[in-house]
Amino acid sequence: MSDSPTPNPPPASTRLALHWKVLIALAIGIALGSILHYGWTAETWKSLGVVDVKPFLAGKESDANAGAGFGAHAAKFAVDACSFVGKLFLLALRFIAIPIILSSMILAVASLGDIRKVGRIGLKTITCFAITLVVAIVIAIGVVQIVKPGKFVTPEAKAKLLGDFSGELATKMQAGAAAQNQTIWSFLLDIIPANPIAALATGNMLQVVAIGFLVGVGLTMIPREKSTPVVAFFDGLSSTMMELVRLIMACAPVAVFCLITQTVTNLGFGSLASVLLYCLCVIGGLAIVLLIEYPILIMLMTPRSAGMTPKKFFAGLSPAITLAFSSSSSTATLPVTMACCRDRLKIPASIVNFVCPMGTTINMDGTALYQVVSVVFLSQLYGMDLSATQLLTVGVMAAVVAIGAPGLPGASVIMMAVVLESVGIPTEGIAIILAVDRLLDMSRTIVNVAGDAVACVVVAGWEGALTPNSERQQPEPIGPG
Ligand code: ASP
């Protein structure tokens, strides 16, 4: 590659920052998706010669669609291209997630130098995760018990949702069967992989965090001349992956547009009406966590001199927030969350490398809140009044699920059966909330991601490692533009 400068690059100030481009793409995608969902009907396909839409879009030959003309094929190409770009973008982010978690964790622990410091920061991190988790669960119980959304669903709407989504539920339950058979002991034993290579190959996040942690601890205990080359290798790997994040994020506006257009086109907003109050409870609870709990924590736990205001926090984290919303995956968002914390919020790499990978794996306040609101909502819908002990059980089980759930789209719904069964609520009730899960998934993923960044800020504050206000500069862009 030549080093010669690009002729007349536009001045930085006139270029739109990446997060604005992503936000604009998000808004256009939602608008276009709504138009397509409500405007592009079976009649539209018929006018293009497509009678049986599903097999046509799946690329299957069918006599009914023999009359499909150029317009129909062009529309199918647009749908396929949109899906391809969205999937490619998420794959690219997932591709770098494992190497980033592994190398970051190893570097973080090794750079702390001695095992006591690892223990201290580890304890602070877990304390912060626990505080935010408990508060999120308390908020969830408060909101759902005050509003009682389950009492407002009509029996007809309940029967319709149960019928419409029972097929999808069966598929999800199969995927979640393994989670239901787990006890807390087997869950803990599962964290240590018998075969680290297999854990890396299958992408078991919690095990990858454990491998990184243990290798990092080992590196602090051997002579420096032996550990230096290993640390240098993982340092190089980590820097390479972070550069790839910048490259991938340059495509974010297009990818976010494709992802959101697809989601809204497929789902629309129709199913929202009958469970609107439930959705408002989840979104309201998430908003309280995001806009009240987190800012209070940031203000209380960081020294004034660091100048870490909630406004600065959200401005710095905005690329990760928009990506979390459009991808519904905190694992896919992890590389961007780390880049935001390090480059825009100026949190030391040693803390970001330690807190973020661990947080993505076990710190999911949004997921816990969602579990509690959903389970209590279903209990109200089935006319069961939960006792205080049962509410406590729901809270504890929701915390366990939030720790164990992978940061992937729809992960919570699969694992909800565990919480429902703990208090004897019929698991087929999940069908009722499946209809609106995507929107709620996008929203809770924002909180999951923001919770990790909050933990980074708080732990850095406790360690006295936040960049003082006077030395803080404008947020750095992620990716070109
Ligand atoms: N989609 C969420 C995440 O990636 C997990 C969940 O389903 O709650 O953080």
Image (spheres, rainbow, N blue to C red):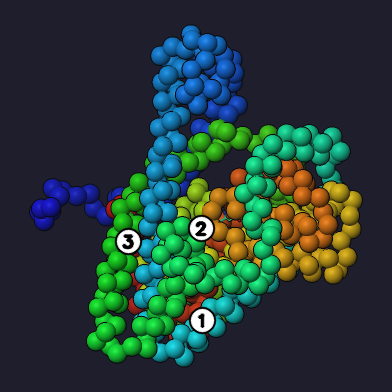
Residue drawn at point x = 46 percent, y = 59 percent: 203
The answer to whether one can see residue 247 in this image is yes
Q: Which class describes the residues within 10 Å of circle 3: few (<14), some (14-19), or many (20+)?
A: many
Of the pair 17 and 65, the residue shown nearer to us: 65
**x%, y% of residue 295?**
58, 70
Q: Does mark 2 have its CB less than 8 Å from ligand 1?
A: yes
Q: Is residue 53 above or below residue 339?
A: above
Furthest toward the top, the residue is 67
Amino acid type at circle 1 is Gly
Secondary structure, mark 1, is helix
Counting other residues with Cα less than 10 Å from the Cα at mark 1, is it few (<14), some (14-19), or many (20 or more)?
Answer: some
Q: Residue visible at 55% across and 32% down? A: 265
Q: Nearer the viewer, residue 195 or 357?
A: 195
Disc count in the image? Answer: 3
Q: Which residue does the numbered mark 3 point to in the structure image?
A: 241
Task: Give coordinates of residue 415: x percent, y percent.
Answer: 66, 55
- Where on the image, by quarter, is ligand 1? bottom right
Q: Is residue 393 above or below residue 122?
A: above
Q: CA distance from mark 3 to mark 1?
A: 24 Å
Snapshot quadrant of residue 102:
bottom left
Q: Which residue in the structure is indicated by mark 2? A: 330
Disc 2/disc 3 C-alpha distance (Å): 17 Å
Q: Say which residue label 1 marks.
A: 122
- Disc 2 is placed on an element classified as helix
Q: Which mark is residue 205?
A: none
